[in-house]
Amino acid sequence: MDGKTVLVTGGAGYIGSHACKVLAAAGFQPVTFDNLSTGWRDAVKFGPFHQGDLTDRASIDAALAKWRPVAVMHFAALSQVGESMKDPGLYWRENVLGALNLIESALAHEVRRFVFSSTCATYGDQDGVVLDEDTVQAPINAYGGSKRAIEDMLRDFAPKGLESVIFRYFNVAGADPEAQVGEFHQPETHLIPLMLDAIAGRRAALTLHGTDYPTPDGTCVRDYVHVMDLVDAHVLGLRWLLDGRGSRVFCLGTGNGFSVREVVDASRAVTNRDVPMTEGPRRPGDATRLVSGSARAARELGWTPHRSTMAQMIGDAWRWHQSGHYDR
């Protein structure tokens, strides 16, 4: 498979840049396709860069014609739950229309393998169960709804010859242990980088969004996966398609959840610093407890999230924050 090219949409973003690193190490040539609206040009370190926008079909056609990839790995999306509640049309235009353009362009250029970064937000708020591939999808916000629509779209295009691997997962955390790439968003909305910002003095305090959830400590619970474990799974999914094994859906999780307060407590052990905190109201669209299993991914892909301990995820993220790359 050496020399095979993969178009990575959103490759200048957090997860996409880590995927490019792992793809390059596995013998592929990752080509980043990104409009840099939320990604960063200096995160593109492991292959060529092609600037373009998924809402512009002509720019996708140009990239596919130039690079002739064997597959598309699709990360690019708007992903803020609160924003999707305030402006659902934005999410349906950018995420769903963008994906439709990408799928139709891929088929027009005879690219028939598609790895899609979906989300367990498609399940909505289903407390007390470990979510898997057969759990009923019932999203409670426009972000989850847009991702479910793309999943449906991929299935509808299967008779046209499109084969897809869909990955559903929750919170991604950590960073490249070598600190070549890491997590940086503007604005930042993810718990661990917000927490590390507060520890480092980049923000006044971490806000706890809701302290009255029906959980042991009143804060919501999420499943966390190390970003390097996550992108390893995407490469396994790509190989699955290249081996001709057909379309499949996989959940990626540890089966264990951490509350916000538990994540904060874990950070103290890693950084030896306290986290300044304030309490705020719940955010619209946030579920109480979301935990995912990954039995199918373990059984069929051979995937194990061996880096996904809270100590390693926070430790690798903290190393990235202290590396100097974080300051922009």
Image: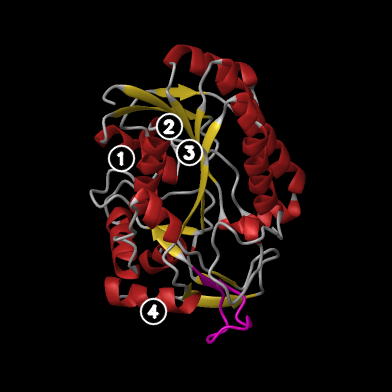
The residue singled out by tag 3 in the image is: 39
Callout 1–callout 2 Cβ contact below 8 Å? no
* Disc nearer the start of the sequence (4/1): 1
- The correct choice, above or below, for 132 with respect to 265 in the image is above
Say which element carries label 3: loop
Secondary structure under the numbered disc 4 in the rendered image: helix
Quick one: label 3 or label 4, which is nearer the N terminus?
A: 3
State the residue position of label 2.
Answer: 244
C-beta proximity under 8 Å, tags 3 and 2: no
Label 1 belongs to which residue?
22
Local secondary structure at mark 1:
helix
Q: Which amino acid type corresponds to the residue marked 2 in the rendered image?
A: Gly
Q: Residue at x 28, y 56 (%)?
A: 322
Q: CA distance from mark 3 to mark 1?
A: 18 Å
Q: Relative to 209, does residue 158 appear above or below in the rendering?
A: above
Query: CA separation, marks 1 and 2?
Result: 21 Å
In the rendered structure, which amino acid carries the disc numbered 1?
Answer: Val
Q: Circles 3 and 4: CB distance less than 8 Å?
A: no
- Looking at the rendered structure, the kind of residue marked 3 is Gly
- In the image, what residue occupies the spot 56% across and 53% down? 119
Q: Specify which label sits upstream in the sequence, 1 or 2.
A: 1
Q: Residue furthest front?
A: 245
Counting from the top left corner in percent of width and height, residue 14 is at 43, 45
The label number, if any, that marks residue 265 in the structure image: 4
